[in-house]
Image: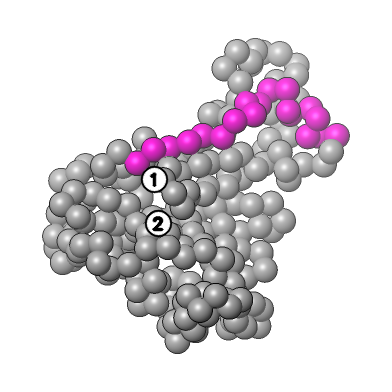
Amino acid sequence: MKRLIFSLLFISGTFCSFAQRMEELFIKMPEGIVIQLEEAWRKDLVDLYKSGKAATLENMMQGRSTLLKLTDNYLLLQSTECSTVEMKLLPLVNNTYIICMITTVSAPVADSRVDFYTTDWSILPTGELYTPVTADRFLKDDIDHSSIAFSDANALLDIFLVKYSLDADNNTLTAEYTTPLYLDEESRRKVVPVLKDVPKIYEWKLSRFE
């Protein structure tokens, strides 16, 4: 797996040093990745943020986009009123990096997509870099699958929604089960007893979230 990722990076010529900061990657990203903002607008958001002003602009969807946080290796963008984009530079070896991007849409409950890119914005195979969490991960380990309580709860959990988030201060990826938030209050009371109350947390291990 590592050989595949390193080969893709070598072919695309993206073994780069940390001199390429998140703000530069954000400004130069292809316009199809965050369709609400053209390059000039992304640059304006960065300039506003760095000046200490409110980094908010009208976007192409006739809404507003806000740059909420920007460091050398992390970015959080409120891209629309109901969606966010998070990006983090993750280290490989010899001062090389890849980009992890989380796109989350709340309509009304948060659900996320995880993508990985080289630093010249070539897409990387997601399955080689992390294993998506499944609904079973959020069930209590000692739950009786033959019980009526489990059967009733399982029937209510008929869709799978999960919110992924990155940490600005460390290389972790957190997965939170948001399907229960989609349910009405009575249904939520029925499913809570069979669910764990802690998220799944991945740690970046050189070339993969584990």
Quadrant of the frame with the C terminus: top left
Residue ID at (58%, 44%): 162
Q: Which residue is mark 2?
A: 88
Q: Are marks 2 and 1 in contact (CB under 8 Å)?
A: yes
Give the mark nearest the N terminus, 2 or 1.
2
Q: How many marks?
A: 2
| The label number, if any, that marks residue 38 in the structure image | none
Which residue ends up furthest to the right in the rendered image? 186
- As drawn, the residue found furthest toward the front would be 52
Which amino acid type is marked by label 2? Lys
Query: Which SS class for mark 2?
Result: strand
The relative height of residue 37 versus residue 199 in the rendered view (above or below) is below
Left or right of 210 on screen, residue 165: right
Q: Is residue 165 above or below residue 51?
A: above
Disc 1 marks a residue whose amino acid type is Asn
How is colour applied across the structure in the image?
one colour
Res 153 → quadrant: top right
Confirm whether the magenta stretch covers residue 203. Answer: yes
Reply above or below: 119 against 91: below
Q: Is residue 61 visible?
A: no
Q: Residues within 10 Å of mark 2 (few under 14, many from 20)?
A: many
In three-dimensional space, the C-alpha distance between marks 2 and 1, rounded to whole angstroms, equals 8 Å
Q: Position of residue 176 (x, y in %)?
A: 58, 40
**200 lies left or right of 128:** right
* Residue wearing tag 1: 171
Which residue sits at x=82%, y=41%? Answer: 184
Q: Which range is magenta?
A: 186-204
